[in-house]
Amino acid sequence: MVWRGDIVRAALDPQVPFQTYTPPDAPDYARADSWALRDVKIAGAEDAAVFFVHSTTFDGGHEWNGRIGDEKADAYLERIVLPNFAGPFAMAGSVSVPKYRQGSLYSRLTLRDDAREARAFAYRDIEAAFDHWIARHPQGPIVLVGVEQGAELLARLLRDRVAKDAALRDRLVAAYMMDAMIPRDAIDLPVCSRREESGCLVAWSMVDEGKSGAIPRRQRRALFWDERGQLVESGNRPIICVNPVSGSSDEVKTEARRHLGAANAAGLEWGVRPAFIDRVVEAQCREGFLRNTPLNSESFRENRSWTDRRKAKPYNLFYADTMADVQARLAAWHAKKATTFSASPPA
């Protein structure tokens, strides 16, 4: 039991240099089976197009990068990640979730160069999926979302593509990077300072209040993209923290009474709204991290395997808050467009 983590970690090591590794075949994003969700819209949803980059669901073993269609990885994606983290965006509009040759869980458990290359390799699929998706949505508001590893990949997409394209910046409602450490100076887009703002970045990395001892280790292991497209240590660079309860980047604590609701949506079908537990979580951005009070309800206890405990959680402490946030920013985006249109001189 003492050495179990080391034993599992060793078993997940592909034992082959990435330079000599043959990755799985690339997905074809013209095919429906290359998407976990493709332009799925529930009744009553708004008019945004949502592009969601999922977190790590593939453990590893013989492969540095997961193949498209891996049954175990897809099962975790569909049962845990989509209902808990893509679910809050369902009311914003049509949701698309590409499958991609994700870096394995092992690639996130070590800072070896091989692991970094495996994580960087996944970006080419995200870029290809985004090109296909944006061609299907040439107009209208867009929402970009990433969770954990997906947020890391989204950060590069935002830096290299969205921030440099005036038309895409103009269409951006917000970009959400959940449970990820994103340096404030990594992306040339503004950080959201209030909820009634659009075209900005929302990101946070959660730490249970009273467990600050985990922060130094997180900071040591945090990586960001350099100009060569490589993942390098972030050092002590200030990171983005936007409080999902208030929608603000300030350091004011939001009291539990303002919390709109946590949810354990694991296993729910797409479009089914989970039950919320509200008014129970305090949250505060402090020194770049989102300090939150833990939720000790039976539905939020983690009785999972060693590997699953290192993936996205099977619940979302800020489900209802995120849902309200994206709808408020979408309304702000539309209001800004209406003002711009009415202020434009006639042709």
Image: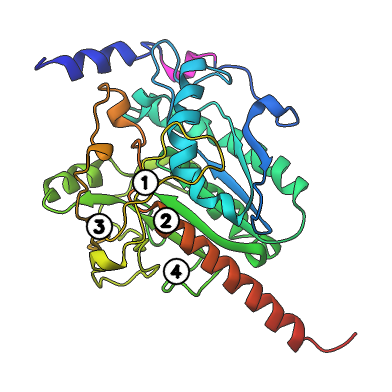
Q: Quadrant where the C terminus lies?
A: bottom right
Give the labeled residue for mark 1.
263
Residue 162, numbered circle? none
Q: CA distance from mark 4 to mark 3?
A: 21 Å
Q: Which residues are magenta?
A: 17-22
Q: Is residue 55 visible?
A: no
Residue 318 painted magenta: no
Residue 317 on image: x %, y %: 32, 50
Contact, CB < 8 Å: mark 4 with mark 1? Answer: no
Give the labeled residue for mark 4.
192
| Residue at position x 24%, y 57% in the image | 280
| Residue at position x 36%, y 11% in the image | 15
Q: CA distance from mark 3 to mark 2?
A: 12 Å
**Mark toward the start of the polypeptide (3 vs 2):** 3
Residue 109 or residue 286, whichever sits in front: 286
Give the labeled residue for mark 2.
320
Q: Is residue 298 visible?
A: yes
Residue 59 or residue 228, whichever sits in front: 59
Location of residue 205 with respect to 199 vertically, above or below? above
Residue 142 on image: x %, y %: 64, 57
Q: Quadrant of residue 163?
A: bottom right
Give the labeled residue for mark 3.
281
**Mark toward the start of the polypeptide (4 vs 3):** 4
| Residue at position x 49%, y 14% in the image | 21
Q: Quadrant of residue 337?
A: bottom right
**Mark toward the start of the polypeptide (4 vs 1):** 4
Q: Amino acid at mark 4?
A: Cys
**Mark toward the start of the polypeptide (2 vs 4):** 4
Q: Amino acid at mark 3?
A: Val
Q: Please give left or right for residue 172 compared with residue 150 in the image.
A: right
